[in-house]
Amino acid sequence: MLTKVLTNTTLGDETWTTDWNQGIGGLSMATAYATEVSPSEKKRIYRKVALRLMPLLVICYFISFIDRTNIGIAQIGLERDLGFSETVYALGVSCFFIGFIIFEIPSNALMSRIGARKTIVRIMVLWGLVTIATMFITGPVTFYIARFLLGVAEAGFFPGCLLFLSYWFPSSRRTGMTAIFFMAIPISGAVGSAMSGWIMSAFGGVAGLADWQWLFVIEGIPPLILAAIAWMVLCDRPSRAKWLTAKEKGSSPFSWCSSVVPLTWY
């Protein structure tokens, strides 16, 4: 049985990894050679990857925060139509985080088996469907269930995106990409509330649906669309990217990617 030992050697600003396959009776070394590129070419490749991946990830995170917080905009309608008290509303908000916390580790465990791309798509499909289904709540119990399921659906999205970034960027560049990713939070705060308020004021009563029902329907559709786009655009490894040339895949910016070993959960 073979076991893998990773040895990292830092040369300049690059970390080169040697994979040692250790077996019974001795060691055999398998070393991957990468094509060295100039700093300007390296920067161009990373920029190409960032422009391809980061806008979609930021938009997805932006939508996730809107779907988490739109319940605050819908509160007035829920209290008006379903008679929710502040206690019912507060407990429903807490149910989201209960589901989110309980299923965070199982979601990450599944992610280590199926990959970050499939995990991100799965989460977005589920949270889109749960958000749309929230329009059918009729009382406190169904409200609690809907919020709990939304937390379950969204669990693992943030760590899944961070794992995905680790497949594409070394630690020296991942910090900047993570900062860009976090931009979705203030953007959602600035834009999300105004957008949700407009939806409720513009669509309330249309087709016999209440304003808060339209809010959940309309804001549940973007995750489904983005999931389809993510399935076509994202790929777990540079070696699988059809939009990278063979030379770019084999260049030194991605030489470290072969050493990224998926987490194993026991």
Image (cartoon, rainbow, N blue to C red):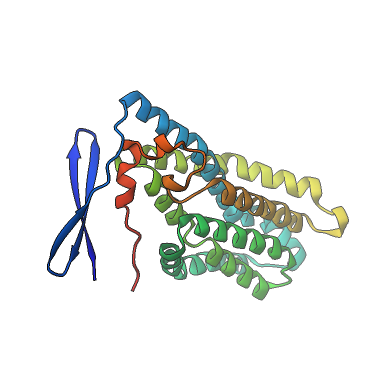
Residue placed most toward the observer, 160 or 82: 160
Residue placed most toward the observer, 142 or 235: 235
Residue placed most toward the observer, 6 or 147: 6
> Is residue 1 in view from this perspective?
yes
Give the residue displayed 40% in from the left and 53% down from the top.
163
Q: Residue 138: horizontal and vertical position, in percent?
A: 74, 71
The residue sitting at the left extreme is 25
Give the residue displayed 58% in from the left and 52% down from the top.
231
Q: Residue 222: horizontal and vertical position, in percent?
A: 66, 50
Image quarter (top left, top right, bottom left or bottom right) of the C terminus: bottom left
Whether residue 30 sits left or right of residue 51 in the image: it is left
111 w.r.t. 266: above or below: above
Give the residue displayed 77% in from the left and 64% down from the top.
81
211 w.r.t. 174: above or below: below
Whether residue 155 sits left or right of residue 63 in the image: it is left
> Is residue 63 in view from this perspective?
no
The residue sitting at the top extreme is 40
Whether residue 50 sits left or right of residue 75 in the image: it is left
Q: Residue 77: horizontal and vertical position, in percent?
A: 73, 58
Q: Residue 43: horizontal and vertical position, in percent?
A: 37, 28
Image quarter (top left, top right, bottom left or bottom right) of the N terminus: bottom left
Give the residue displayed 85% in from the left and 54% down from the top.
205
Residue placed most toward the observer, 59 or 68: 59
